[in-house]
Amino acid sequence: MKLYYMPLGAYGTNCYIAHNEADNTCLVTDPGDEGEKLKEILDSHEFKVQGILLTHGHSDHIGAVKTLVDAYHVPVYIHEGDAECLTNPTVNLSAHSGRYITAEVDDVRYVKEGDTISLGDTTFTVIETPGHTPGGVCYYTEGTLLAGDTLFQGSIGRTDFPNGDFDVLSKGIKEKLYTLPEDTKVYPGHGPETTIGDEKQFNPFVR
């Protein structure tokens, strides 16, 4: 598997494309904005999109979902705790900026702790990490963690939004993420990549 990323939208949300070279299939994680630009890139490489993985439902992570679903007719994976974010601009926070983003699609598949999603020989396992949002999750495969807004280089997800909970978020990071191999690369929703080992040692918010 190869992993590509591009920051999208005003908030520079990292969208990740997991690519299986054997058959040119891919999974798209957190397509937050600029749907037409993202579609052009996918089409230019003739990638066969198999699904959309959402780490949570805030608008800066779902803004291009509808564009991709309309184009490729693929399922959207999200935790049920964030399901309302797909249809309610107040809950997904886009109403606060006047954009009123939704991602109302037919094929929504709810994920939970331990569920797996495969791409060729690669299997992503769902890790529930609520706290930034009630339905926050990470997707893990050996050596790689798609962390969304759970864990950043030197920081963690905000918990001052409605339904945020610092204690729950920090507990999940300590018990579920910091127990992963230290050389696991962490690919966050914003900013540069890091590793589990570096965050265990240097992250000032969760030690």
Image: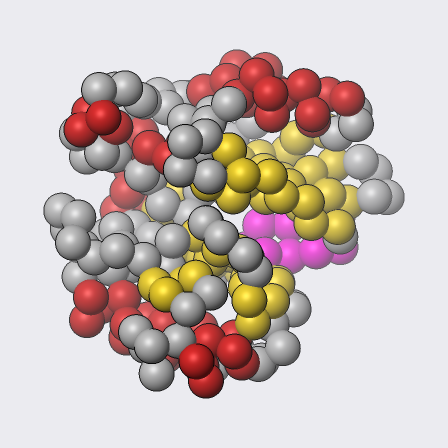
Where residue 143 sits in the image (x, y, percent)?
65, 69
Where residue 98 sits in the image (x, y, percent)?
22, 20
Which residue is drawn at the image coordinates 32% and 22% (left, top)?
A: 102
Give the camera-side residue of 99 and 176: 99
Seen in the picture, residue 203 relative to 119 is either above or below; the reply is below
Quadrant where the C terminus is found in the figure: bottom left
Name, please, the residue furthest toward the left: 162
Left or right? Give the position of 142 relative to 168: right
Seen in the picture, residue 145 relative to 109 is either above or below; the reply is below
Left or right? Give the position of 157 relative to 109: left
Which residue is drawn at the image coordinates 41% and 27% (left, top)?
A: 63
Residue 107 visible here: no
Seen in the picture, residue 171 relative to 169 is either above or below; the reply is below
Name, please, the residue furthest toward the right: 22
Where residue 122 sits in the image (x, y, percent)?
70, 56
Which residue is drawn at the image coordinates 56% and 27% (left, top)?
A: 74
The magenta span reads 116-124
Give the camera-side residue of 151 and 127: 151
Residue 125 visible here: yes
